[in-house]
Image: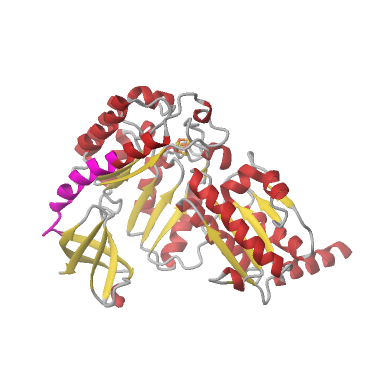
Amino acid sequence: MENTSQETQSFQQNQDIGQGRGVYISTYGCQMNVNDTERMHSLLEMQNFTPVENPEDASLIIINSCSVREKPVHKVYSEVGTFRKMKDKNPNLKIGVGGCVGQQEKENLIKNQPMIDFVFGTDQIDNLPQMVAKAFEGERRQINAKFEHRAPYHIETMVRNPGVATFVNITKGCDNFCTFCVVPYTRGREKSRPLQHILTDIRHLVKRGVKEVTLLGQNVNSYKAEEGLDFADLLAKVATDTDIERIRYTTSHPKDFNQKLADTMAAHQDKIMEYVHLPFQSGNTRILDRMNRNYTREHYLEKIAMLKKTIPNLVLSTDIIVGFPGETEEEFRDTVTLVEEVGFETIFAFKYSPRPFTKAAKFEDQVDEDVKTERLNRLFDAHDKMAFDLVKRYEGQTMRVLVEQADREFGKIQGRSTSNKLVHFLGSADLIGKTVDVKITKAFPATFRGELV
Ligand code: SF4
């Protein structure tokens, strides 16, 4: 009896801990982190914290960090420096670091940055309210970065204002261990959410006005439901068993992309959008092998040919790394020719940067920074030359656009075409959430301008 009343009292205190207090969350990195920040905000709102736009107005600051490349890690450390000065002036301010840097650095962060009150890992977001309560009760230097390897992945989407289009996590972590990538170390082993949970989640989002979902994971097409169903089965179920209007997904791995998945997309083209983001990383088979990507240049091109044959109007984008250790000039040129051969309208290209724990960081034949920069510039130049011509064909065409929000330019609205192009056009805000026909008047590789038909 006594225990129960103590627990109730502590729960009550826990719930009220945010009363009159503002929370500021600084977010870096991928869409997964953006979703995690939404989850943190939702959990903290249950403790009555108020989100604030300005760190100066906050009693609690959380950095949701990213360590996938070197640059965001440096930014996190520089932000920690800024917040330290704020804490010097206001010792009651609490500071926590989560996300991939929190997972990776754990004790180091607490040891080297004593003003940090708590550090938490990517598997510990749901324990954030307890950590925050303890921090406000005076507990310092908490570290909670355990991976819950055995715990099932049963989370429901927590988004405060989902809007018209939102992201739904379906897998977390990754088992692929590409030799350049830190994700398996910061996000842990791959886990899939139960299929029925995902369907229920999407039905709830539909009730809240969501028209489009993007199924999200580090490697979505290796999704496995307990019933032996795979990612193609999940896509088909979302298309047939929910009232969502549009379905997208990201990111997929070439080795797991098969005919069944392409056939499923083709069979449900009314709902599954004709756009695939399929990272190839390098156009050279020797480098792909060193990256542990488990496909060759030829295999990748075969998958692209299969996709284009099955879905003729398909639009593709990709991720590329230049200057991977040992990459020769000739091998880099294989990357450029692959971009040209596939005809990607959009590419996301980066210079290789060594990440902690990864195999490639220990490779001795690292490429000079100047060479990496020069190759990256040449790749972008080659892509620019073809991409503007490629998208010209859209000018004059009419596209189905889901209106997502008002544009920054007065009187304009914006939305996405079925092929994931951002389209800006004149229109009134009451069209938000509706799918309309827009005639494209000007096409750039990533954005279009148009007029309502
Ligand atoms: S597939 Fe490779 S690049 Fe993608 S998250 Fe997994 S290890 Fe990283």
> Furthest-right residue in view?
2
Q: Quadrant of residue 369?
A: top left
Name which residue lies at 34% across and 25% down. 328
User: Mainly helix, strand or loop, the magenta region?
Assistant: helix
Q: How many marks?
A: 0
Quadrant of the rendering where the N terminus is positioned: bottom right
Q: Answer whether residue 140 is magenta in the image.
A: no
Name which residue lies at 34% across and 53% down. 247
Name which residue lies at 61% across and 63% down. 43
Q: Nearer the viewer, residue 333 or 314?
A: 333
Q: Quadrant of residue 440?
A: bottom left
Q: What stretch is highlighted in magenta?
A: 378-398
Locate residue 348 relative to residue 12 in the image: left or right.
left
Is residue 122 visible to the viewer in this orientation of the structure? Answer: no
| Place of residue 398 in the rendered image (x, y in percent of width and height, measured from the top left) | 15, 61
> Furthest-top residue in view?
286
